[in-house]
Amino acid sequence: MRKPNCECYRCKKPVYRRPKQIEQFNHVYCSRSCYGLSNQIVKNCSTCLKEFKPDKTTSRYCSKGCANIGRKGIKYTKNQKQNSSRRRLDLLEKQFDFQDCMIKGCNYNRTYNVHRLLPGKEGGKYAIGNMFAICPNHHAEVHANLITLEKINDYTLMEHEKE
């Protein structure tokens, strides 16, 4: 083994290189990892704009937290406990304390779907008086145009069969 005649540009470890290699290259490295680490590209994070050295050439964010902020689609938070349907059902339960499907004469009480009497495409909002907790069977029948619903009051509907 030869005596070291120079040192690594990055970690200062003594290393041997041929004189021609020392002249040819500006810097000498002891390994590929030192070469890669010292020649790593610095980028700015797309979210926080801090400088970082990416693991991959396609990386755009400095951390997973910044990547989540930059995501498109559903945003997850620590305080998110229930989805919008559950919140709407809770609002209806708090307001009316119903025990069964809100269609008169239906005794189904296992699960409920929130249904808008005036559809959203016609300007109907999820608000008391327009949203009702109905059983999945009635909900499917309404959307299949087998029955129509008539509002009796803010918490009761009447079904009519279509002919």
Image (cartoon, helix red, strand yellow):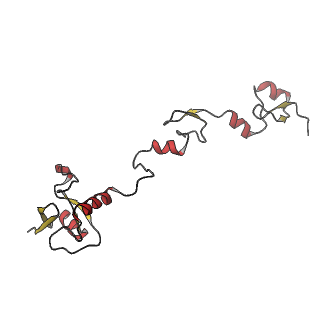
17 lies above or below 81: above
- Image quarter hosting the C terminus: bottom left
- Describe residue 45's horizontal placement relative to residue 87 as left or right: right
* Residue 155 picture location, percent across and down: 17, 63
Residue 67 or residue 157, whichever sits in front: 157
| Residue name at image x 29 percent, y 69 percent | 111
* Residue 16 picture location, percent across and down: 86, 34
| Residue name at image x 15 percent, y 60 percent | 154
| Residue name at image x 14 percent, y 65 percent | 157
- Image quarter hosting the N terminus: top right
* Residue 20 picture location, percent across and down: 83, 27
- Describe residue 7's horizontal placement relative to residue 90 as left or right: right
- Describe residue 103's horizontal placement relative to residue 2 as left or right: left
| Residue name at image x 61 percent, y 42 percent | 55
Query: How many tags in the picture?
Result: 0
Residue 116 or residue 144, whichever sits in front: 116
Q: Quadrant of residue 98?
A: bottom left
125 lies above or below 103: above
